[in-house]
Amino acid sequence: MDENSNVQDGMVGPKGQLVQEEEREKGRVGFPVYWKFITTAYGGGLVPFILLAQILFQLLQIGSSYWLAWAAPVSEDIKPAVAGLTLILVYMGLAVGSAFCVLARSSLLATAGYKTATLLFNKLHFAIFRAPMSFFDATPSGRILNRVSTDQSTVDMTIQYRVAASAFSMIQVLGSYCCDVSGCMVSFHNFYPSGCSLRLVSAILPTFCSRTSKVGWGMQSSSDPAFFRDYIRINHTIRGFNQESRFRNTNMELSDAYSRPKFHGAGAMEWLCFRLDMLSSFTFGISLIFLISLPERFIDPAIAGLAVTYGLNLNMILAWVIWNLCNMENKIISVERILQYSCISSEPPLVIDNNRPHPSWPSHGEIGISDLQVQYAPHLPLVLRGITCTFLAG
């Protein structure tokens, strides 16, 4: 009664509109979205093999560095531990093994990404093609086109590499940390402050990226191209009414809004990298002083130099981890949006075996309607009320 009275008074709220506002999630993307994406292709059966290939690659990389540090002589007056030919052959074997790991990882990742994108594509299009007419009445075509074009393109070309890069960079961080721990105590001085900063910024920055991406990136992918497309289509009308400057200014404002999320994302990343560099430079300097002050023969100079090298690269790897996490958080929204439209309630099947008419139907051409009531959507008022009539047979 309240809804009908509001409609009669001319006060139709948001729920009384045929076209509703687009639903926008807030906060971080939930783990079920990631899990659904990972397990779409072959139930996630290729994921352990991809991670195993990356772990083996990281171990072979660390092993080759250790091999050079141990086998290569520190100076000319020191006898080498192994012959030069053995040094080269073992190093070549480790390099060939690393190459095969990269080949296996890339092949499995491409296969899983292709299968996932294909399944999501088929599921999305089947849901849209089988959606009831009320869905198309209440959903603008631009929203549907964004899902099947921009979001699907992201799933096809980008998202699997972003998820893989996040996992690979974390494995690389763990490998560097293990190398430092096995090398010397420089890891305690260098990795612990950087690890604290990683936990801090990984709890703040991805949330910032996800909150801005829910609004900014969604508007970025639809507002400016749609306006420019309409501008081209009605260009002659705009010029006929001498409104070129007005539409030009609007187009420039939308172009600025289109680029603003990327600008803020780049600024946040530079802010983070600068502070990570300052923190790592300070802690790495302390670690070097500690390492130099150790007594002679306390640690092998070659292993100490290897640990220092990995510790020097650790800050860059940490920044790379955070950048991948934020980028993955932004891109995974495309998967979330596709899954949202893949769960649309579909129409009944074209043929219902248990409800099929008799083969001789219709035996009589008369049509009777009793108390017909029609509304465009469940939340909208009735447009036809209690119609009862009979169409006689011809």
Image (spheres, helix red, strand yellow):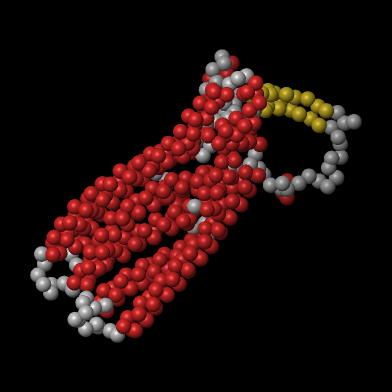
Residue 197 screen position, x and y as percent: 25, 50
Task: Using the image as rendered, state which of residue 160 and residue 116 is in the foreground.
Answer: 160
Task: Using the image as rendered, state which of residue 391 and residue 265 is in the foreground.
Answer: 265
Query: Which picture quadrant has residue 192?
Result: bottom left
Query: Which picture quadrant has residue 78?
Result: bottom left
Q: Quadrant of the N terminus?
A: top right
Residue that sits furthest to the front in the current view? 76
Residue 138 screen position, x and y as percent: 60, 32
At a point 71% along the width and 26% down the height, the residue shown is: 371
Left or right of 269? Residue 41 is right
Left or right of 185? Residue 335 is right
Task: Using the image as rendered, state which of residue 43 and residue 278 is in the foreground.
Answer: 278
Can you see residue 211? no
At a point 56% along the width and 41% down the height, the residue shown is: 146
The number of callouts visible is: 0
Residue 360 screen position, x and y as percent: 85, 45
Can you see residue 19? yes
Above-or-below relation of 196 to 58: above
At a point 28% along the width and 47% down the height, the residue shown is: 274
Left or right of 133? Residue 181 is left
Task: Using the image as rendered, state which of residue 136 and residue 108 is in the foreground.
Answer: 108
Query: Which picture quadrant has residue 363?
Result: top right
Residue that sits furthest to the right in the current view? 394
At a point 29% along the width and 75% down the height, the residue shown is: 68
Q: Quadrant of the C terminus?
A: top right
Residue 142 screen position, x and y as percent: 59, 36
